[in-house]
Image: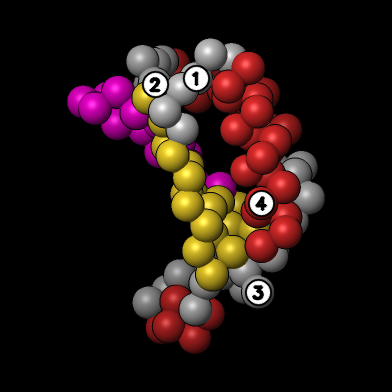
Amino acid sequence: MPTLLQIDFPFTGPFGEEMHQAMQPLAESIIEEPGLIWKIWTENTASQEAGGVYLFSDATAAQNYLEMHSARLTAGGVTGIRAKLFSVNNPLSLICKGPIQ
């Protein structure tokens, strides 16, 4: 069953196009993660936060990614990481044009 992972954390930048330039290599590696279907990158300059919403093929892939990514963020000095895992209701999501398979 598809699983949605939501992650956010305090982030002081860069944002916008500068974030795009700085994080492109990371984005290119994330898309290779096992079970990842897509990721939407999130940022909020006003609250100084960043993160993402991910769709994985199953809960195991999502949990494995969460553990790896949390360790990577922590190693980079990030604290205050918030994460949630959700099962996806495919029929309702499709009615609302959710980008799922």
Q: Nearer the viewer, residue 30 or 71?
A: 71
Left/right placement of residue 22 relative to residue 71 reads left
Identify the amino acid type marked 1: Val
Residue furthest to the left: 46
- Residue tagged by mark 1? 78
Disc 2 packing (10 Å; few <14; some 14–19; many ≥20): some
Say if mark 1 contacts mark 2, CB within 8 Å: yes
Q: Earlier in the sequence, mark 4 or mark 3?
A: 3
- Residue tagged by mark 3? 1
Q: Point out the image quarter for the C terminus.
A: bottom right
Q: How many marks?
A: 4
**Which of the 4 image quarters holds residue 46?**
top left
Q: Earlier in the sequence, mark 1 or mark 4?
A: 4
* Mark 4 vs mark 3, CA separation in Å: 13 Å
Q: Secondary structure at mark 1?
A: loop
Disc 4 packing (10 Å; few <14; some 14–19; many ≥20): some
Identify the amino acid type marked 3: Met
> What span is in magenta?
39-52
Q: Position of residue 70 (x, y in %)?
A: 60, 33
| 100, above or below 78, in the image | below
- Residue tagged by mark 2? 11
- Residue tagged by mark 4? 63
